Amino acid sequence: MVTLLAIGRLRLSPPLVLAPMAGITDLAARLLARENGAPLCFTEMISAQGLIRRGKNTMALLKSGTEDRPLGIQLFGDDPRALAESAGIVGETCDLIDINMGCPVKKVVSGGAGSALLREPAKAAAIIRAVRKATSLPLTIKIRTGWTSGEPSFLEIGRIAEAEGCDAVTLHPRTRAQMFTDHADWDRIAELKAGIGIPVIGSGDLFSAGDVVEMLGRTGCDGAMIARGALGNPWIFRETTELLSGGMPSPPTMEERRSVTLRHLDRLCELYGDKTALCEMRKHLSWYARGMPGAARFRALVNTLVEKRQLRAAVDSFFTQAVHEQRTE
């Protein structure tokens, strides 16, 4: 089983990556993933044009720290010159640059970026070529299998990426048309791995340590990028590392869930201030509480709270009760 992922000069062990997720992978979330064994984490997807304009909201996405390395930054756009310029802007703040060629969201593809580039191989090549000239950092792209099932372009784009100097390709094996429905077709990851000579990172439907190990074994890919499986579950990186090492995964105790949830809240408050942090934390709380007794009531409660002390008290009460129930089972 693969235990080392080489992307240019980066060496990552275990071969795991926290995916770029809009509205999710800010500094607070990345630090929790790192504490649980994620060797490489991505910022949220960042607009090349926003960087060039030095937009306030865009620049805020770059907030990081010395403990947040190695750091990947994913850029999106459809203009080779703009993407090259933006790569130069972030070059001193990260350790790897990724070009998004897979985002299926209408707002992104309507501007010619994300998955729209899967239908324009010449433009995709021009973008990679321009960014490669602009940076010496490890360079990757993230793609889907194609626009629709009738337009599978992943092999062509993967070969273009290799020819233009990319150091790795990440494949989420769904089409743009599928969005996040149906099942990710991991066989496509194996097909891409057999078709190009640079590392392939697999993504899609990785919700447990067992899923990650199964994907690595079935496809022969070089690493795994974890996205939705990390929501409210930073422990997936620790558990996967344990499984890859031949051990048994050690799931978090209720006490650990409680302390990590509160730490996430505190870090969001440091990052955004209490008012914004409370709004941001509500979605995370729904994920941290997922599958637990009383989760629906807890979600309804936290959506009514407007002060940090109230939210901390609600979190503490919810998980303390769960700890008590766990001890009395």
Image: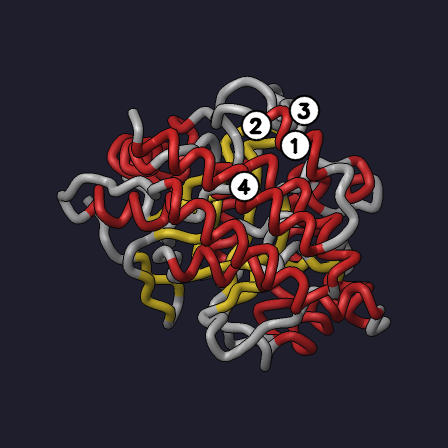
Q: Earlier in the sequence, mark 3 or mark 1?
A: 3
Few, some or many C-alpha atoms within 10 Å of disc 3 (few <14, some 14-19, many ≥20)?
few
Q: Are marks 4 and 1 in contact (CB under 8 Å)?
A: no
User: Distance between the Cα atoms at labels 2 and 4?
Assistant: 12 Å
Few, some or many C-alpha atoms within 10 Å of disc 2 (few <14, some 14-19, many ≥20)?
some
Q: The residue tagged with tag 3: helix, strand or loop?
A: loop
Residue under numbered circle 4? 317
Quadrant where the C terminus sits is top left
Quadrant where the N terminus sits is top left
Which disc number belongs to residue 295? 2
- Which residue is pictured at 67% across the width and 24% down the height? 177
- Which residue is pictured at 38% across the width and 26% down the height? 187
- Which residue is pictured at 62% across the width and 59% down the height? 26
Residue kind at label 4, given as amino acid type: Ser
Which disc number belongs to residue 252? none
Given residues 211 and 27, the one toward you in this image is 27
Residue under numbered circle 3? 177
Q: Are marks 1 and 2 in contact (CB under 8 Å)?
A: yes
Q: Is residue 103 left or right of residue 138?
A: right
User: Distance between the Cα atoms at labels 4 and 1?
Assistant: 13 Å
Q: Is residue 197 left or right of residue 290?
A: left
